[in-house]
Amino acid sequence: TYVMSHAKLLAGSEEMPDVLAPIPFGRARVRRVGDDVTVVALSVTVPAALAAAEMLAEEGISAEVIDPRTLVPFDSATILASIARTGRLVVVDEAPLQGGPASVIAGMMADLGFGHLRAPIARVARPDTLVAFAAGLEAVGQPTAERVVAAVRRVMGGTCLPVSIARP
């Protein structure tokens, strides 16, 4: 078993239950329930997706946010059930757009859930370039809540451009 955690998540915190239960390996976690669009976010992009869902709620868009937690095994059933209800999918990851997990998940969901989709799948990921060695330049490609909101707006309108950076 290979376990990977993102360093940027180490400083975060969240409410803990009084009784800890084992995390089911291979089971996604629905972080927020929604009816209009499914947002699948990986690792460090989960907080950005949750912030985007809050912003979208103010516009009357109900976003379901799912954290797969594991890629192998991958809980496609939870995501497919969500897509069957919402008809729309946005996948968020900080890896490059081409060949990254967001592209793999988008392809898998297109194969398995095409009949449920009412709009093209959107991906929010880094541009296909090297990550800069300067904090300011690194941040340019990082998926943000604003980029997730822009992608959701595109799929809610029924259009989706396959770009890695949503321009303001």
Image: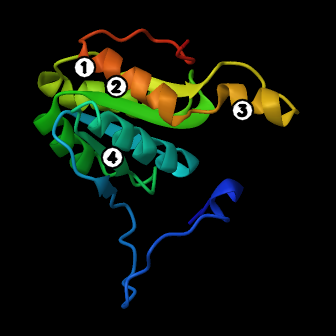
Q: Amino acid at mark 2?
A: Val
The residue identified by callout 2 is 152
Using the numbered discs, state the Cα–Cα distance from disc 4 to disc 3 in whole angstroms.
22 Å
Which of the 4 quarters of the picture holds residue 112? top left
Q: Earlier in the sequence, mark 4 or mark 3?
A: 4
Determine whether label 4 and label 2 are within 8 Å by CB. Answer: no
Which class describes the residues within 10 Å of circle 4: few (<14), some (14-19), or many (20+)?
A: many
Between 132 and 111, which is closer to the camera in this rendering? 132
Camera sees residue 133: yes
**Distance from the alpha carbon under mark 3 to that under mark 2:** 21 Å
Residue positioned 41% across, 38% down in the render: 52
Q: Are marks 3 and 2 in contact (CB under 8 Å)?
A: no
**Residue under the image location 82 percent in, 36 percent down:** 135
Pointers 1 and 2 in contact (CB under 8 A)?
yes
Residue to which mark 3 is pinned: 139
Q: Position of residue 127 (x, y in %)?
A: 64, 20
142 on left or right of 49? right
- Residue at far front of view: 58
Residue farthest along the bottom direction in this orientation: 19
- Residue 74 in the image, given as x and y percentages of width and height: 37, 50
